[in-house]
Amino acid sequence: MKRILLSAILVATSIINAQETVQVSMGAGYVNEVYMDLSDQTENSYTAESWDVAFLRDNPQNIGIRVNDGVGITVFEAANNAAAFDAIDVANEGAWTPLYNDDTNWDNGAFMQGSATYGWGEYNPVSHVVEGTIVFVLKYADGTYIKFINESYLGAYTFKFATWDGSTWINETTQTVENTSNPETRYNYFSLKNNEVVIAEPAIDAWDFVFRKYTTFLNPPGEYYTVTGVLHNPNVTVAQNDETTGGGNPNGLDYLEEINTIGYDWKSFNGSGYTVNSDMAFYVKRNDNTVYRVVFTEFEGSSSGNIAYTVEDVSSILDVETVTNVVSFGMYPNPSSNGQVTIVYENGALVSENSVVTIHAITGAKVYTSAVKSTSGFFNKTIDVSAFKSGVYLVTFKSGAASISKKLILN
């Protein structure tokens, strides 16, 4: 019965439990950014140089502007007064302040590091508009300079920019990018060089991590460098675990929100190529508590941009125990951090006795009770525990005179 129930749970929760090897490529010279969906290995690739600036658009109350640091663009704060836009002189580059994207948080981009309250601007309490006060200059790897100011934000980003031709600023342009554009993505992307909006990421629920180049602070040597690695979706968390002795377990690990938890250092340059640390496993947990175990196996570097990794669904399910010779019971996830726990049970035949699930607080107080079906078959019941305080609870499954209890941890 226990084995039958476990098999049924695996089907009901779509657990793969089969390791799959995945091959992806960023292309020679890392010309592409590659977004991966671990549930079905869907791959979405975008030309890395297609965009320059990205605008957070998922919520009218949230502001975020990032630069495409992976293609060698550096952002400088050149002036802290909007009126200085016309007076920017590239001869003063040595006095400008370099700014960088935060590689732990998507929304804390380089433009958010400026000296204004909101990085690039100040809030106007009368108009409820954030007004641009900081003038930035973007310096490209090819030596191009573009000056930029985000003039205002209220559900849309209105910005102005111009290009340095070697002696003066030309092609001054004002554009507005609406938050309502591309409603399934978190960011809207814009190419300043081509003066156009571009699509450079898939829908927010269609990817788990992205292979790309990005800037990070290396200490030592105490400088910012561009590295090639993996940044994860802000809606997943990742745990890293050294598994030199073999297979691992997704339970009991420290799942982190920092988007560079996988990062770049699962590989190292050995003088002629790259050595991949295949003893390091990464556990990627989605909001639905599906967990994928990822282990990198190959990295060919910029010559091809080819990468290989293995992935398997290791979603946490507690041990399933027999209540009677015809009834088995289990539950997941445990610990639970999303305010829900699913009870799974199987009746091998019609059960004459009533079956009941109860939950008790550690104090002994009963906080939940519900009857469950007694007909034969496999069943699951999701319980809303969002109103319960964090802590340890006791879940009891009772079938007639037989019962079994399990500890449930709510985070």
Image: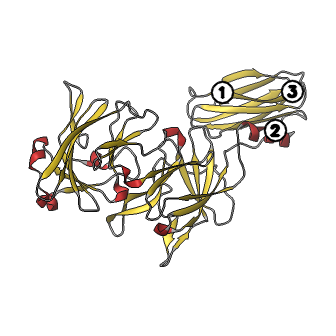
Circle 2 residue? 5
Inspect the image, locate mark 1, and give the three-letter code of the amino acid beneath it.
Ile
Q: Secondary structure at mark 1?
A: strand
Q: Residue furthest bottom?
A: 271
**Cα gap from disc 1 to disc 3, whole angstroms:** 21 Å
Q: Residues within 10 Å of mark 3 (few under 14, many from 20)?
A: some
Q: Element under label 2?
A: helix
Asked whether the beta carbons under mark 1 and mark 3 sit within 8 Å of each other, the answer is no
- Three-letter residue code for mark 3: Ser
- Residue contact at pointers 3 and 2, CB within 8 angstroms: no
Q: Residue 270 vs residue 175: left or right?
A: right
Mark 3 to mark 2: distance in Å?
Answer: 12 Å
Give percent across and percent down for residue 56.
Answer: 36, 39
Question: Mark 2 vs mark 1: which is more N-terminal?
Answer: 2
Dot label at residue 383:
1
Tag nearer the camera, 2 or 1: 2
Spot occupied by residue 82 in the image (x, y as percentages of width and height): 14, 41
Q: Is residue 335 above or below residue 378?
A: below
Label 1 crowd bin: few (<14), some (14–19), many (20+), radius 10 Å: few
Q: Nearer the viewer, residue 273 or 195?
A: 195
Residue 59: percent from the left, percent from the top? 39, 32
Q: Is residue 82 above or below residue 339?
A: below
Q: Amino acid at mark 2?
A: Leu
Residue 16 position, x and y percent, is 71, 47
